[in-house]
Image (spheres, rainbow, N blue to C red):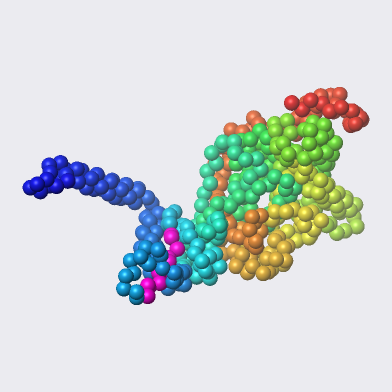
Amino acid sequence: MNGPNGPTEGAFPYGSLVVDMALVLLVGWAVWWIVRYLRADAMTRQSIRQAVRVRWGWKRLAPMLKLAATDKTPTALASLANTDGKPIKPRVLIPALKVTHDAYGVIARASCLPGVGLAQFQKAAPHLADAWKCTRVAITQDKPGQVVIRGVRLDPLKLPTEHRPTGGVPDEAARWDLGLDEYAQPVSVDLTQVPGVTVAGLPGFGKTSLINRLLSDWAPSPCVQFACADGKVAAAHEGDYADWVQRMFAFVGDDLEEANKLFRDLVELRRLRSAWARKVLGVKSMWDVGPSENWPLVVLVIDEAHTYFRDHKGSDPKTKKLAALAAENARLVEDLVKKGRSVGMLVILATQKSTGDAIPTFIRDVCPVGLSFAQKTAEAAVAALGEEIREWPDANPINLQDPTYVGVASMNHQSQPGFTRIRTPYVSDADAARIADSTAHLTADPSALLEAFLGPRMWDKDVDLEKPAVDAA
């Protein structure tokens, strides 16, 4: 406000206060960014610098890549301001871009414009990778009118990772966290309503560590019980599951007769669960209510599965007996895979080559989820992942034989077309032993749980299943 002789007292102090506050905010913001930058690791610092370059260069880069729209219609304000009658210059519209970073690169969200949508961004992806100095760039639709641009400076598939299990009960039943995809995004698989999983790959490329992670993450839940048949060893202490055997209600080695008994027991459990599911749970499928301590999800791990199914050739009595056991084992596991889904039974079959002689096709081809680590032949890759893998050469596991790719698997993901490659983390033996020790008290035989829950009278196999249901509360 001005007085007769100039500005009145108080006007300048007020303006000075506003300036001071703005400077304080600016300095605070700068200090926050500097502290954040200094506390970050070397990889993240590179990503921070990369994100800054992406923001600053976007308005110039977008028109060069035809990611801009020209608006020839003048705005109302421009029309009112045009007093000389000259043509109004068209406006160049640049998609708004918000950029964040992580250790591997940048994640940008861009708003679409008329004529500049998902297809145009995907077409420009290779050029964005060059301009942003990224190994690869992926464009996906985040929501209508917005795309997500994921650029990775470092290839996540070439950087080994580790997983240290917390020992906490998982938030979701039957969700298997696998690792990071080739864009460093977490990948998980929902195994609810899934009867079987196949895991293939050359020795030493990550199959056991992959299963170790599932055991480590799921073992703290009393609603999951484990059994294992390990075809590599004669006894548990000799193999990869020496620590885990205390968290398993059953374990067998490479003896076909012992494996046959385990498979028979599980088929009998499957049959009893099928008979009692509606009466005990009130629903046909256990997944309608989820697993519980009394009716847990039963996970059967069959490692080196070919041991139990291999066709034995010969006419001597011993070979004939082995051949009969192998054929019976295949029939029993087929029963579990084809009929165990709705009653909460999951079979994980691991082998080097999941060809028909290792895992019979009538078992392998009904397992909805399949993963493969490195393979030597195209035949083995097709057996593990299906004929479609031929159409996705970049994801073919025959390209994963380099030692750099130990721990990297290919899979057909449930939520997206085609195949994706995943960097699975390493789980140390010490961490696996720690979780096994701390959760050993949760081990229980599902058959005993069902018998105890039903009571001796209801457990009688001759009971009339048409009688009123027991109270499942």
Across and down, in percent, residue 162 comes to 52, 49
Across and down, in percent, residue 261 comes to 82, 41
Residue 96 falls within the magenta-colored stretch = yes
Nearest to the observer: residue 356 or residue 387: 387
Kindly give the residue lying farthest to the left in the view shown: 5
Q: Tell me the quarter of the picture where residue 443 sits.
A: top right
Res. 112 visible in picture:
yes
Q: Tell me the quarter of the picture where residue 201 sits.
A: bottom right
Q: Is 418 drawn above or below residue 327 in the view shown? A: below
For the point 66% across and 33% down, the residue is 222
For the point 33% across and 66% down, the residue is 81
Q: Is 455 drawn above or below residue 211 in the view shown? A: above
Q: Tell me the quarter of the picture where residue 253 sits.
A: top right
Magenta stretch mostly in which secondary structure? loop
Nearest to the observer: residue 268 or residue 358: 268
For the point 77% across and 54% down, the residue is 366
- Give the magenta part as a residue range: 87-97
Nearest to the observer: residue 426 or residue 141: 141
Q: Is 449 drawn above or below residue 322 in the view shown? A: above
Across and down, in percent, residue 138 comes to 53, 63
For the point 85% across and 59% down, the residue is 313
Residue 365 falls within the magenta-colored stretch = no
Q: Is residue 221 left or right of residue 463?
A: left
Across and down, in percent, residue 465 comes to 89, 31
Res. 183 visible in picture:
no
Q: Is 4 drawn above or below residue 291 in the view shown? A: below
Q: Quadrant of the C terminus?
A: top right
Nearest to the observer: residue 191 or residue 402: 191
